[in-house]
Structure formats: C-alpha cells, structure tokens
Image (cartoon, rainbow, N blue to C red):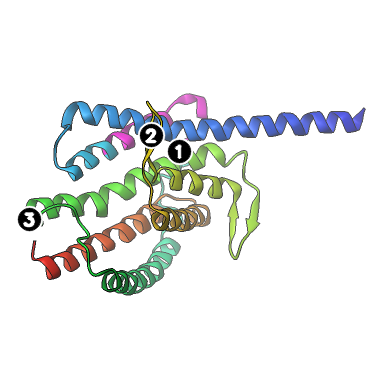
C-alpha cells in the first residue's frame, strides 16, 4: 500500500509539473501574441524597429501586470526586481562583456569575409533608423525578454523545477526550461495555417547558450539586473558591430 501511495504521489507530482510547464509556456506565448495583435493595430507597416519597440514595451507591461496578481503571493523582489548581489553582478558582467566583444567581433568579421560580406541589416543607415535600432537592441530588448523569460517564466517554473544539475556549471531545471522556451521564441511561425516562417539554426544555438547563461546569472544573484545587462550588452554590441561593418562596406 505504501508503495502504491508513493507511486500515486509521484504521478500526481509529474502531472502537476507538466501543467506548470504548460502554463509557463502559455504565459510567454500569449503575451507575445497579444503584443503582436496590439502593435499591428497601432503600427502596421511602420519601420520594423519602431514596431518591435512597441511590441516589447507591451510585453513588459503585460508581464508586470501578471506578476502583480495576488494569486502568486509574491513581491516584485521575489520575481527578480531587486539589486541583490549587485557587486557580484557587475563583476560577472565585466568579464562577460570582454569575452563577448572579443569573440563576436572575430567570429562576425570571419564569417562576413568567408561569405563575401552580404548586407547585415535590411534598412538604410540614416540617423533616425540607427538611433531607433540601437535603442531597441541596447535597451528595450533585454528589459522585455528578461522580464518575460527570467522573470515571469522562470519564476513560474522555479518552485516546481528547483533541482539543480551540473553540466559544466550548476543550473536548475527551471533555468534550462526557460532557456528552451527562450530559444523557441526565436522561431518565426504562423498559427492559421500553422507554418514555420523563419528559422536560423545558428541563432537558435546562440539563443539557447545565452539563455542558459542568463538563467545561471539569475540564480546566482537572485536578481534580473544581471540578465538584463548581459542581454542588452550582447545584442547591443552586435548591433554596433553590424552598423560599422555595413557602413564600411556599403556606405549606407
């Protein structure tokens, strides 16, 4: 009887965890779809990064509203809105930034040379476009996506997937799942009819690797500050690099 009870509890626990994972997935998926719908109403046909900026701002608002619901019984500090261990955060960010700038600069220049230097950005490099692009990539994207994935999604998963494993570094299953969902979010698709509209294997690999790093940083510091800074630095530097390369090769 005791064995049956243990097995029954194990099954119930597994079902509960599956439901929590589904809920976490639906949270980011529905937030994204709702933001797409509302942004299209306001800015359909506008410059792509203006559209993306509003889309991500709406994601921030919706994620924060969901976090504020009393059903969670959590403060915003519990979701990661705090400055805990900020000195440790800044130390890690400094090391990450140096490594990221060196590696991505070498890799990007090498791949551009091998591929014959195709245009990296699909828009004209006037002052307005550059400022909007850099504002999105260096400020908005990190805040939005880290609040959604390392805040809301991770925070939903962490009470149920808090067991940690070592894969060269220590990370919880919640961190791994949030990184997987973050990777899935980089696949473009339509629902009706269902079709994958864009997929870039290298981008997905990088997204998963960075997603793991952001999750480890979230767990190590207990704060969203590190993931947000790292995310904006990673995307922001690539944006600056792309502008420099495109302007130096095409002049536009």
Q: Are marks 2 and 1 in contact (CB under 8 Å)?
A: yes
On screen, residue 168 above or below 179: below
Query: Is label 2 in contact with label 3 (beta carbons under 8 Å)?
Result: no
Going from the N terminus, do you reach mark 2 or mark 1 first? 2
Residue 153: x and y in percent read 48, 39
The residue nearer to you, when weighing 19 against 233, is: 19
Label 3 environment density (alpha carbons within 10 Å; few <14, some 14–19, many ≥20): few
Which range is magenta? 57-75
Is residue 163 covered in magenta? no
Give residue 235's quadrant in the image: bottom left
Residue at the disc numbered 3: 127
Q: Which mark is residue 63?
A: 2
Given this view, does label 1 or label 3 mark the residue nearer the observer?
A: 3
Q: Position of residue 93 (x, y in %)?
A: 39, 64
Residue 132 in view: yes
Residue for badge 1: 152
Q: Quadrant of residue 119?
A: bottom left
Dots 1, 3 in contact, CB < 8 A: no
- Callout 1: few (<14), some (14-19), or many (20+) C-alpha neighbours within 10 Å? many
Position of residue 113 relative to residue 224, above or below, is below
Q: Is residue 137 above or below residue 52?
A: below
Tell which residue pokes out farthest to the right in this image. 1
Secondary element type, mark 3? helix
Question: Which secondary structure, mark 2?
Answer: helix
Which of pointers 2 and 3 lies earlier in the amino acid sequence?
2
């Amino acid at each position: 009887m005791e064995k049956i009870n243990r097995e029954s509890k194990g099954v119930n626990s597994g079902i509960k965890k599956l439901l929590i994972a589904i809920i976490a997935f639906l949270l980011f998926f529905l937030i994204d779809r709702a933001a797409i719908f509302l942004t299209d109403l306001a800015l359909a046909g506008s410059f792509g990064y203006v559209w993306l900026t509003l889309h991500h701002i709406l994601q921030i608002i919706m994620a924060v509203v969901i976090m504020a619901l009393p059903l969670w019984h959590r403060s915003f500090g519990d979701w990661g809105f705090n400055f805990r261990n900020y000195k440790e955060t800044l130390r890690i960010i400094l090391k990450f930034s140096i490594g990221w700038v060196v590696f991505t600069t070498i890799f990007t220049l090498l791949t551009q040379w091998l591929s014959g230097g195709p245009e990296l950005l699909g828009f004209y490099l006037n002052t307005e476009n550059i400022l909007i692009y850099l504002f999105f990539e260096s400020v908005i994207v990190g805040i939005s996506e880290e609040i959604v994935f390392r805040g809301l999604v991770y925070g939903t998963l962490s009470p149920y997937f808090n067991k940690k494993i070592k894969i060269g570094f220590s990370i919880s299953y919640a961190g791994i799942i949030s990184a997987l969902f973050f990777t899935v979010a980089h696949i473009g698709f339509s629902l009706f009819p269902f079709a994958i509209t864009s997929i870039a294997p290298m981008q997905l690999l990088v997204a998963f690797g960075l997603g793991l790093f952001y999750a480890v940083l979230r767990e190590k510091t207990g704060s969203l500050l590190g993931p947000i800074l790292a995310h904006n630095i990673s995307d922001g530097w690539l944006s600056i690099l792309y502008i420099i390369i495109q302007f130096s090769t095409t002049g536009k």
